[in-house]
Image (cartoon, rainbow, N blue to C red):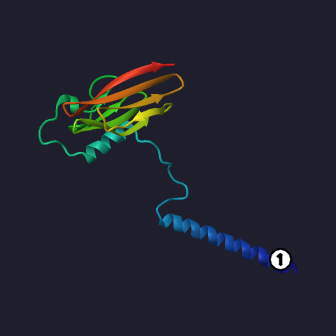
Amino acid sequence: MHSRLVLAVAGWLLAAALAIGTGVAVLGLLGRPLTGPAERPMTAEEIRLALARDTPVPPSPAPADAAPVDVSGGQTPGAVPATGRRLISTGAGSLIARCDGGLVRLQSWTPAQGFEVDDVDPGPDDRARVKFESDESGLEIEVRCAGGVPVPRVSRHDD
């Protein structure tokens, strides 16, 4: 009787090992590893690279204000400007805005670490806006179209 119990336990352990091995193999074939990198928001540099890769270079030189803007100052280096589309980066978060037919639309927005999106009006409309907030402060970015190019207006709100 004791050998039957040992044989039954061994059979269950073998079945469990085969089930786990099969599950891991199927997950590997589907391309989703059991333990892999978690999905995360894109960094500003990854956004710039994606825009440069996905946006064709305009046939004529783009206006100086068509380049992505770092609201803390000057032009963002290394980005390919696209008429009607702009990356706007702040310490509270980043967004991509696009003008089409005189209307602005927020294509994406990502809060910076420590911030969250409080409210968003993505458009399309004559203005679009997003509010980023943290425990200490808030920031609202309102975007309008001027000459077919998104133009940001940034307002800070300290709590």
- Viewer can see residue 53: yes
Dot 1, crowdedness within 10 Å: few (<14), some or many (≥20)? few
Quarter of the figure with residue 156: top left
Res 141 → quadrant: top left
| Residue drawn at point x = 27 percent, y = 24 percent | 74
Image side of residue 90 versus residue 78, left or right: right
Location of residue 73 by image quarter:
top left
What is the x, y in percent for residue 48?
31, 39
Residue extending furthest toward the front = 125
Q: Inspect the image, locate mark 1, and give the three-letter code of the amino acid beneath it.
A: Leu
Mark 1 lies on a secondary structure that is: helix
Q: Does the rendering let one see residue 112?
A: no
Q: Which residue is mark 1?
A: 5
> In the rendered view, would you say 102 is above or below 91?
below
- Residue occupying the point 56% across, 65% down: 24
Task: Please give the name of the residue rendered at 36% of the width and 35% of the height, measured from the top-left corner.
Answer: 95
Outermost residue on the top side: it is 158
Q: Quadrant of the N terminus?
A: bottom right
| Near-viewer residue (107 or 12) | 107
**Residue 86: x %, y % from top left:** 28, 35
At 58% across and 70% down in the image, what residue appears? 22
For this rendering, which residue is in front, 26 or 141? 141
